Amino acid sequence: MEIHSSSFVISNTDWNKCPTENRLEYAFIGRSNVGKSSLINMLTNNKKLAKTSGKPGKTQLINHFLIDNHWFLVDLPGYGYAQVSKSLRRSFGKIITEYITNRKNLVNLFVLIDSRHDAQKIDLEFMRWLGEKGIPFSIVFTKSDKLKLGQLNANIMKYKNTLTQEWDVLPEIFITSAESKKGKEEISEFIEKYNTEYQEHFVGKAK
Ligand code: GTP
Ligand code: MG
């Protein structure tokens, strides 16, 4: 699946004010600076769509993007950014958790993990919470261009081993790079599959 059009719709702090839940949507989440916004731009072939930054904490709102006039991609604020104040960190957390637990048209959450690092407590805890809440998610390893292939494979293997200690079945895993566009097809196909599968529930409402 190739994305032909993408446009910014609206930013919100409140899930209640997000666009009407009559189109399927897929959201991107993970630690600040992990590459959420860059990945959205890579998938949409639109470098200017989501705002990216070398400094963590760039995305602070729930951002909806309309894709091919049909479904939404959602860029979420990063979690676990230590440099913002505690109260701000709490409010980020509230924005995210309320969005995730309430949004009825959310098909899948892509949890982004920097492929260079060892498993971090905050990501493992977050995924545990998703499991408890029954929220469907997949794991997306980012910035794979920053590692040699051998190191990348070793890191992913190690991560999977860590997950296996806690999960009987691992979620779908994608290895990506916003630079080299690695993983673009795999994620696009995954989304397309769900768009097709769930389409009938939304037929007649989406246009
Ligand atoms: P917040 O909005 O602050 O939570 O960050 P984010 O997760 O949206 O990260 P963003 O996409 O803004 O990227 C953070 C930094 O990482 C930027 O400097 C990007 O250019 C860089 N970056 C993101 N993805 C990749 C990648 O695949 N490869 C490389 N080399 N750099 C990347
Ligand atoms: Mg961002």
Image (cartoon, rainbow, N blue to C red):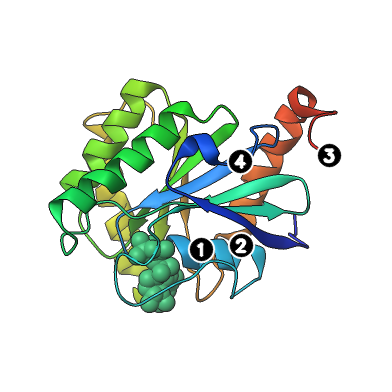
Q: Quadrant of ligand 1?
A: bottom left
Q: Secondary structure at mark 2?
A: helix
Q: CA distance from mark 2 to mark 3?
A: 23 Å
Q: Which mark is residue 207?
A: 3
> Neighbour class for label 1 at 10 Å: few (<14), some, many (≥20)?
many
Q: Disc 4 beta carbon < 8 A from ligand 2?
A: no
Q: Which mark is residue 39?
A: 1
Q: Secondary structure at mark 3?
A: loop
Q: CA distance from mark 1 to mark 2?
A: 6 Å
Pick the residue in front: 34 or 164.
Answer: 34
Answer with left or right where residue 38 lies relative to residue 79.
right
Q: Secondary structure at mark 1?
A: helix
- 3 or 4: mark nearer the eye: 3
Residue 160, by quadrant, is top left
Q: Disc 1 beta carbon < 8 A from ligand 1?
A: yes
Circles 1, 2 touching at the beta carbon (< 8 Å): yes
Q: What's the residue type where badge 4 is placed? A: Glu
Q: Work out which quarter of the rendered image holds the C terminus and state it.
A: top right
Q: Which mark is residue 43?
A: 2
Residue drawn at x 71%, y 37% is 195
Q: Which mark is residue 25?
A: 4
Locate residue 39, reporting x and y percent: 51, 63
Q: What's the residue type where badge 1 is placed? A: Leu
Pick the residue in front: 157 or 13.
Answer: 13
Locate residue 203, reporting x and y percent: 82, 28
Pick the residue in front: 122 or 17.
Answer: 17
Sooner in the amino-acid sequence: mark 2 or mark 3: 2
- 2 or 4: mark nearer the eye: 4
Sooner in the amino-acid sequence: mark 3 or mark 4: 4
Q: Secondary structure at mark 4?
A: strand
Sooner in the amino-acid sequence: mark 2 or mark 4: 4
> Neighbour class for label 2 at 10 Å: few (<14), some, many (≥20)?
some
